[in-house]
């Protein structure tokens, strides 16, 4: 990987984004691309939304009328991506994270919001690179192994337990 540009937007106003989250997202995106031996420069958009907005997007694009934790919108297929004419970077796609959903899941699983957002980012980055888990089986196992490898590298493995106040 040459250069990585991660554009992070906050489209929700319910919850203040804790300090360090944006850097964690950039580190997570970078770690996935390094693990995958990604060739060239890349761009990724990450947007924080509320449950109402992610429900609207989930309904519009997946015909599922329910909030979810994260949605991934890949711009490439089979390793072929649109190129940003200004930077020459491959545009991988968009990641949309519901902050209220992430907080709820962090509490449910007994780990920090940082760990949850790192997981959601890594999970979505793998989707942007073509990985899927919908059909289960070996593809799901491969994806989970890759997720855990990156989370360990980031210092937030599945077995960790952190407080929200970090």
Image (spheres, rainbow, N blue to C red):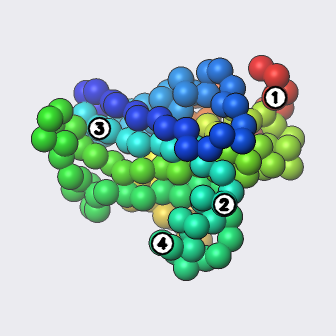
Side (left or right) of 122 relative to 38 = right
For numbered disc 3, what is the local secondary structure? Answer: strand
Considering only order in the chain, which callout, 4 or 3, is on the residue closer to the N terminus?
3
Circle 3 residues within 10 Å: few <14, some 14–19, many ≥20: many
Question: Which residue is depicted at the point 33% across and 48% down?
Answer: 92
Nearer to the camera, 29 or 50: 50
Side (left or right) of 135 relative to 126 = right
Question: Which residue is depicted at the point 25% across and 27% down?
Answer: 2
Circle 2 sits on which residue?
52
* Placement of 97 over or under 130, stated as above or below: above
Q: Residue furthest bottom?
A: 63
Label 2 to label 1: alpha-carbon separation: 23 Å
Circle 4 sits on which residue?
61
Circle 3 sits on which residue?
42
Circle 1 residues within 10 Å: few <14, some 14–19, many ≥20: some
For numbered disc 4, what is the local secondary structure? Answer: helix
Considering only order in the chain, which callout, 2 or 4, is on the residue closer to the N terminus?
2
């Amino acid at each position: 990987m040459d250069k990585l540009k991660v554009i992070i937007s906050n489209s929700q106003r319910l919850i203040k984004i804790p300090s360090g989250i944006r850097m964690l997202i950039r580190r997570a995106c970078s770690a996935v691309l390094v693990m995958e031996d990604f060739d060239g420069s890349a761009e990724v958009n990450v947007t924080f939304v509320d449950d109402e907005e992610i429900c609207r997007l989930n309904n519009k694009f997946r015909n599922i009328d329910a909030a979810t934790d994260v949605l991934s919108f890949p711009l490439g297929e089979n390793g072929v991506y649109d190129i940003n004419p200004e930077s020459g970077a491959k545009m991988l796609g968009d990641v949309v994270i519901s902050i209220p959903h992430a907080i709820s899941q962090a509490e449910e699983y007994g780990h920090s919001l940082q760990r949850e957002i790192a997981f959601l980012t890594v999970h979505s980055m793998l989707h942007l690179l073509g990985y899927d888990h919908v059909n289960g089986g070996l593809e799901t196992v491969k994806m989970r192994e890759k997720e855990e490898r990156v989370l360990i590298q980031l210092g937030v493995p599945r077995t960790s337990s952190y407080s929200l106040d970090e």
